[in-house]
Image: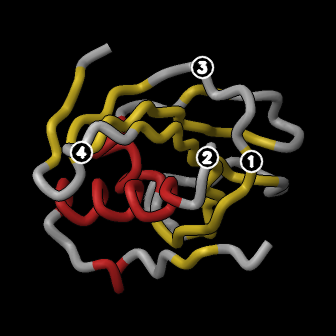
Amino acid sequence: MMTTYVETVGEFKRTKEISGTCLQGYIWATREQLEAVFGKPETSDGYKVHFNWGMHVTERDGTTTIATIYDWKYDAPADLTTSITWNIGGNSSDAVRVVQAILCEQLQMTAKNFDARLARL
């Protein structure tokens, strides 16, 4: 997979190695926005999850974070242009921060556009 450099975070690349991750927060975005930055999603069981992205992020300070973005228990797959609440999973709460930073930089938008917030778990 291709590695992408993001000034605000560091490098990220897609990965299927996402075991051990769990819900860390949410982001409000369209599938079109997510695909523009992370590429085509993996498809899942169609029952609990329709689309998902897994990524390995290496920050400039060497910290690594595994992050996932997925639609959880929607009745139907999200269309390209409708904003929905996507779950952000990860191996730490940093997953929400890095996903938001990557999206903001790559799409040249502000954090407010994505309404990202940390889950209170």
Distance between the alpha carbons at the discs numbered 4 and 3: 22 Å
Say which residue appears at 42% left-offset and 64% top-offset: 97
Which of disc 1 and disc 2 is earlier in sequence? 1
Which mark is in front, 4 or 3? Answer: 4
Of 1 and 18, nearer the camera is 18
Label ID, residue 22: 1
Which mark is in front, 1 or 4? Answer: 4
Q: Is residue 74 left or right of residue 88?
A: right
Q: Secondary structure at mark 3?
A: loop
Instruction: Specify the amino acid type for callout 2.
Output: Gly
| Residue at the spot of label 4 | 61
Image position, residue 51 (x, y; %):
63, 39
Which of disc 3 and disc 4 is earlier in sequence? 3
Say which residue appears at 74% left-offset and 79% top-offset: 120
Instruction: Specify the amino acid type for callout 4.
Output: Asp
Q: Are marks 3 and 1 in contact (CB under 8 Å)?
A: no
Q: For the N terminus, which image quadrant?
A: top left
Of 19 and 112, nearer the camera is 19
Distance between the alpha carbons at the discs numbered 2 and 3: 11 Å
Distance between the alpha carbons at the discs numbered 2 and 1: 5 Å
Q: Secondary structure at mark 1?
A: strand
Q: Are marks 1 and 4 in contact (CB under 8 Å)?
A: no
Q: How is the image coloured?
A: secondary structure
Q: Are marks 2 and 1 in contact (CB under 8 Å)?
A: yes
Q: Are marks 4 and 2 in contact (CB under 8 Å)?
A: no
| Residue at the spot of label 2 | 90
Distance between the alpha carbons at the discs numbered 1 and 4: 23 Å
Image position, residue 35 (x, y; %):
38, 43
Instruction: Specify the amino acid type for callout 1.
Output: Cys
| Residue at the spot of label 3 | 17
Say which residue appears at 48% left-offset and 22% top-offset: 15
